[in-house]
Amino acid sequence: MQIKTFNMAYPDKSFKPTPINELIEKFDKEINQFMENQKEVISVNTQTNGLAGGFQYFVTVVYRN
């Protein structure tokens, strides 16, 4: 078994912050592409942390490939 964690923060730390809908679409696409390439996804866990003026979102995937 292996573990992979994805992390998204809003607002992002770039000079020109990315709109939230673009961040979510990119994050969702990255996770879906990863999971499609695994032999077996055992579990998916999520966690959200509130930050002043934003949030962090984590998705942890336990898998076999």
Image: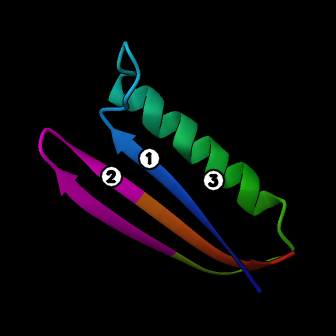
Q: Residue at x 54, y 43 (%)?
A: 27
Residue 60 in the image: state x and y as whole percent: 54, 70
Mark 2 and mark 1: Cα distance apart in space: 6 Å
Q: Which residue is mark 2?
A: 56
Residue type at tag 3: Ile
* Mark 2 and mark 1 residues within 8 Å of each other at the beta carbon: yes
Q: Residues within 10 Å of mark 2 (few under 14, many from 20)?
A: some
Characterize the magenta stretch by its predominant secondary structure: strand
Tell me the quadrant of the picture where the N terminus can be found: bottom right
Q: Residue at x 79, y 59 (%)?
A: 36
Q: Which residue is mark 1?
A: 8
Residue 41 in the image: state x and y as whole percent: 72, 77
In magenta stretch: residue 60: no
Mark 1 and mark 3: Cα distance apart in space: 11 Å
25 left or right of 50 in image: right
Where disc 3 sits, the SS reads helix
Residue 57: quadrant of the picture: bottom left
Q: Which residue is mark 3?
A: 31
Which label sits in the foreground, 3 or 2? Answer: 2
Residue type at tag 1: Met
Q: Is residue 18 above or below residue 6?
A: above
Q: Earlier in the sequence, mark 2 or mark 1?
A: 1
Q: Which residues are magenta?
A: 45-57
